[in-house]
Amino acid sequence: MAELIVISTLNGVLFGMLLFLLSSGLTVIFSMMGVLNFAHASFYMLGAFFGYQLTRWIGFWPAFVLAPLLVGVVGMGVERYGLRNTHKHGHVAELLLTFGLAFAIEEIVSMIWGKSPVDYRVPAMLDFPAFTVFSTNYPAYKIFMLVVSVVIFIALLVTLKKTRVGLIVQAALTHPSMVGHLGHNVGRIFMLVFGVGSALAGLAGVIAGPSLVTQSDMAALLGPILFVVIVFGGLGSLPGAFIASLLIGLIQTFAVALNGSLASVFGPLDPSLGASPLTDIWNVTIAQIAPILPYVLLVLVLIFRPMGLLGTRES
Amino acid sequence: MRHLPFAVAAAFLMLGSAASAQETIKIGYIDPLSGGGASVGEGGLKTFQYLADELNAKGGILGHKVEIVPLDNKTNPQESLVQAQKAVDAGIRYITQGNGSSVGAALEDFVTKNNSRNPGKEVLYFNYAAVDPAMTNEKCSYWHFRWDANSEIKMAALTNYMKDQPSIKKVYLINQDYSFGQSVRTDARKMLAAKRSDIQIVGDELHPLLKITDFSPYVAKIKASGADSVVTGNWGQDFALLLKAAADAGLKVNWYTYYAGGAGGPTAIKQTGLENQVFQISEGVPNSGNKAAMDFEKDFRAKTGISVWYPRAVNEMRMFKAAAEKANSIDPVKVAAALEGMKFDVFDGGEGFMRKDDHQFFQPIYISSFGSLTDKAKEPYDEENTGWGWRIVSKSDTAQTILPTTCNMKRP
């Protein structure tokens, strides 16, 4: 049991940190521009595929640096030539643009790299068990993923809270016109923030690609849960997104580990009921509903605390 | 005389057009070509295209060329019905599908309805891999033919092997949460209890189909349960990722599987270093020792770059030709009648037959284990360049695989 708890905690924290890496960019973009960027998970996918391709050409470490930058450039392009033009038509137009973009990116990726998973491998130098807890190995690459996520989180927090750049960005979040009047180029700030947000998603893709599966539907698999994270954590709140990511990572991992069902708590239903839908519901285990738990959480949060855990404004 | 070359050319052109005027037999291949099932779907497509080319090179079926029409169903029953309707609208009279019994059941229902509503335009459904027993039992249809052994037949053979392995004490079941995975888990529980009541089932897991990207939480649970063997019907990325997570965690157990040989599976097994600890039940393996099959394997690998993972697809296409020739027609109604009860020498040797009662094909099936190959002359084929390959450890003859059916078929 102790083994299961330790390993599940590690797995949960790791998945949570990956979610955070993805949602941090989305949170910043969303709170700044009011754009719910549906293509955010697609930038994550682009990161994974760029990482895969560059790894083949020039090795993993250069790819680790270059791929997120490339995704950032794509993101800036999208902001400069796409979103900025649709901005005057309101939020719905922006939302639709990113929505369409997500589909376009998926099609383009599957046209270039095919629809089956690509062979994106963990670099040889990180391909060994880092340590063994209770006879279970924990791969070094997962530790590497964890370290990268933590470093990025700290760097982001410090930049936003302690530097001048952070000050301007934060001001632009709440009072864009005032920041503009003070002589800052709000348009350029938006573009850079969008680029950084996309690059963060790209970075998550580069490091998650070898560990998970790199294929053209990976964005669709991860997309919905990102929105759970940012709404649950509170719109525009980075610490909120952090807590929500970890919480969701842990909940999902631990839910898988639990076998409890209503039947195991209260005993089986009267056999006279036979195979009714009721007995099916009664026997469903927590592990089976693990994938939908985050969405249950989303619904509950929206009902009881619409601004999210640490959110400050309602949207 | 100087017109001779033109005359010859013209004659050839006319011959050519006469041949192409013959109606092409189109077979709609409805399987995942995107999403989590894409790797297996693409392997199947390459296999069928190769088999069609093989038939065409030998003059097709009764002089008709065979063409495979790929239709992507994304492993989704709803999407499959859309694709099936598209195929019917395009005049396709034969469809084939394999991956996902949820899809298979939807298609079976579709052809049954379609054929009762459109007499004279019947469609046949050739199933090469959807193994939910219900499809040839309570849900059976005259228009459906299955070349793969259903999961009950496979589990019966698998547990016959497992019951003679005294080292098995604690078994963990992990399966995909849909009709097929559920039938694997119920059959495994039932048969293990009957054949080896001392075996303890320490875990019985169902997880979402083709949606999981990281199986570490599940592997942690298997490890904590103290299991020495895992039984799984997982296929596609669900198998490869499960084993990948097991390799990462260093989980050392025996695996009793249906589809360990699918794309990515062999690579994952090699990574775990589980030599001769992964078993698969199938109707044949590349190193079967059957000369005709091994020659076929060589040419197949050279042309497609993958190994023959669907000997049953070979049986399906060759039997289709035999049935059409027996009926002397490519009309689905006559082909279906010819297929009923038909005997056929299968790809890896031995005789199989298409049972008339439920349209289930019975054939010899094998249990093989995956490990390093030493005798290059006898075992030339490895998988996915791992240097490891499948070796047969147990065989059940056709007669030993026969199980009763509850099918009460409505015949036209």
Image: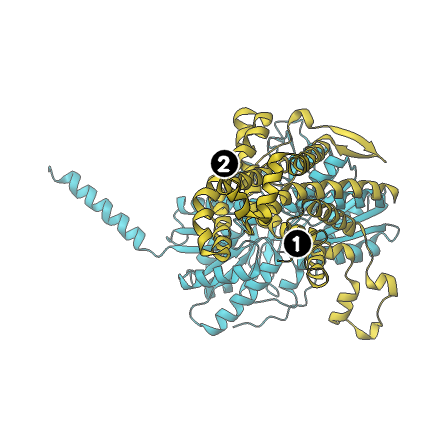
Chain colours: A yellow, B cyan
Residue at position x 83%, y 72% in the image: A271
Instruction: Check the image and name the residue furthest to the left.
Output: B1
**SS at badge 2:** helix
Disc 1 residue type (three-letter): Val
Return the chain for callout 2. Answer: A
- Name the N-terminal-most of marks 1 and 2: 2
Crowd rating for badge 1 (residues with CA inside 10 Å; few <14, some 14–19, many 20+): many
Return the chain for callout 1. Answer: A
Question: Who is closer to the viewer here, B40 or B359?
Answer: B40
As drawn, A262 above or below B250: below
Give residue B30's position: percent from left, percent from top: 51, 55
As drawn, B299 above or below B55: above
Residue B394 seen by the camera: no
Disc 2 residue type (three-letter): Val
In which image quadrant can residue A28 be found? top right
Give residue A232's position: percent from left, percent from top: 69, 53
**Badges 1 and 2, same chain:** yes
In which image quadrant can residue B215 be found? top right
Residue B79 seen by the camera: yes
In the displayed structure, does residue B179 sit left or right of residue B302? right
Instruction: Using the image, tell me which numbered label, if any, was put on residue A73.
Output: 2
Q: Are marks 1 and 2 in contact (CB under 8 Å)?
A: no
Crowd rating for badge 2 (residues with CA inside 10 Å; few <14, some 14–19, many 20+): some
Q: Which residue is mark 1?
A: A231
In the displayed structure, does residue B55 sit left or right of residue B388? left
Question: Who is closer to the viewer here, A131 or B186?
Answer: A131
Give residue B369's position: percent from left, percent from top: 71, 38
Which quadrant of the rendered structure holds the N terminus of chain B? Answer: top left
Q: CA distance from mark 1 to mark 2?
A: 27 Å
Give residue A107's position: percent from left, percent from top: 47, 47
